[in-house]
Amino acid sequence: MDTTRSLFLPPQGSTVASDVDALFGFIFWISLFFFVGVTALTVYFCIKYKRKDGKGETTPYIESLALEITWIVIPTILLMVIFVWGFQDFIRMHIVPANSMEIKVTGQKWFWSFNYAEGATGVGELVVPVGQPVKLLMSSKDVIHSFFVPAFRIKMDVLPNRYTITWFEATMTGEFEIYCTEFCGKGHSEMWGTVKVLPKDEFAKWLEAGSGPGEGESMKEYGARMFVKNACNTCHSLDGSKNVGPTFQGLFGRREVMSDGTTITVDENYIRESILSPMAKQVVGYDPVMPTYQGILKDVDIDGLIAYIKSLEN
Ligand SMILES: [Cu+2]
């Protein structure tokens, strides 16, 4: 499957990947050629024209019209080739094909979520069909992030209060990494995900299936899966240690002081509220940085998470 993976570059998973690589290769080899050439000549001249005792104290005056024309014309031609070539690829990578399927991408501290027109949502995993142009309409809920899929050779900033757009058409099935390439705070290095490219019929089935525990999976196991899938683990530990948010160890039934001085006991309703409206009650000693999962998690997902949290004893 990964026959297009090379020593230096990830597999070519999209229609534009081989073009990007070709231009990159061209620039790379030209740069290498001149780097080696200039360095070698410098060393050669250092040795050849080293000052010999008493002789050759003044640098000779060299004038050559031919030489000057050469080093103006050749780099100009090379730069124009790179410009025209790059501009054509740039245009192609920025004009979204008319038959694209649109997916809304949201970046926030510190995970990606994906909303489909058909209603399906995904966190951390972007599921797409192979051989179909996909338009990504992207925005951020907090700071600037950047959406990068190396195998597709696409990268686009994701900003708050504004939409940015990019697109790709996957040419092979499989799983490919997504990274955030804009330093966005403490959890930046964990802000990664996967693009899962499925054959068209499997993708259609996936869109229909929606969410909920799989066959033979208990609510608790489903919740454990949601805990990782929705990036709760980037802020909540399971071993009692304090992270960005409070630990989940022994959370259920715990009495806690809120920032307004009131005391609550953690029950199902409190957990649900914490997930959907994290700003409603703030645990004392923590920053109000928990993102809302309103519109991302369905009831069944929250039920799973509650079952999972209940199972985490002291
Ligand atoms: Cu980020």
Image (cartoon, helix red, strand yellow):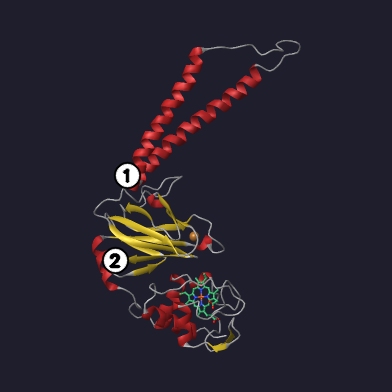
Give x and y (percent) for residue 314: 57, 85
- The answer to which of 5 and 200 lies nearer the viewer is 200
Q: Residues within 10 Å of mark 2 (few under 14, many from 20)?
A: few
Q: Earlier in the sequence, mark 1 or mark 2?
A: 1
The residue lying at 76 percent from left, 11 percent from top is: 54
Q: Residue at x 42, y 28 (%)?
A: 78
Residue ID for mark 1: 92
Where does the image place residue 299, in percent across and percent down from the top left? 37, 80
**In the rendered structure, which amino acid carries the disc numbered 1?**
Arg
| Residue 221 appears in the figure | no
- The kind of secondary structure element at disc 2 is loop
Residue with the mark numbered 2: 117
Residue 124 percent location from the top left of the image: 42, 65
Q: Nearer the viewer, residue 52 or 168?
A: 168
Hey, which quadrant is residue 6 in on the image?
A: top left
Q: Position of residue 13 (x, y in %)?
A: 35, 51
Q: Is residue 285 above or below residue 29?
A: below
Residue type pointed to by label 2? Ala
Quick one: SS at disc 1? helix
Residue nearer the viewer, 33 or 260: 260
